[in-house]
Image (cartoon, rainbow, N blue to C red):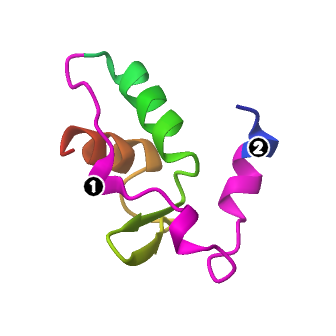
Amino acid sequence: MTAEEYKKLLEADFDDMDISRMKDIREIRIDRNLPKEERIRQYLRQVENPYLVRVGGVKVKVRFADEGISFEQAFEEMLLNM
């Protein structure tokens, strides 16, 4: 995926997104035995937009502050806990 494609995903409008088209992260399954890079690829293939997901009937937009842990650290932590 190119930087431009990631930017487009990040800029997707939360309010305009139809919740029925969003992936429910509770249904995503990741093989924990795979290397980190492949777990990331599995997640991205299943979720389609890693910045806009749903948990049941709740829309979630993933954002990160300038301070705190990095996106990679937060993403890895999320994958390890799925």
The residue wearing badge 1 is: 26
Residue found at x 74% / y 52%: 7
**Residue 60: image location, x then y, percent:** 44, 72
Left or right of residue 36: residue 20? right
Residue found at x 58% / y 51%: 49
The residue wearing badge 2 is: 5
User: Which residues, given as a range, are shown in magenta?
Assistant: 6-33
- Decide whether residue 8 is among the magenta residues: yes
Q: Which amino acid type is marked by label 1?
A: Arg
Numbered circle sitting on residue 46? none
Kindly give the residue lying farthest to the front in the view shown.
20
In front of the other: 3 or 20: 20
Looking at the picture, does residue 80 appear above or below residue 38?
below
In front of the other: 64 or 66: 64
Q: Which element is circle 2 on?
A: helix
Left or right of residue 59: residue 30? left
Q: Which amino acid type is marked by label 2?
A: Glu
Residue found at x 30% / y 49%: 27
**How crowded is the residue under tag 1: few (<14 C-alpha within 10 Å), some, or many (20+)?**
few
Please report whichever mark, 1 or 2, sits nearer to the chain's N-terminal start. Answer: 2
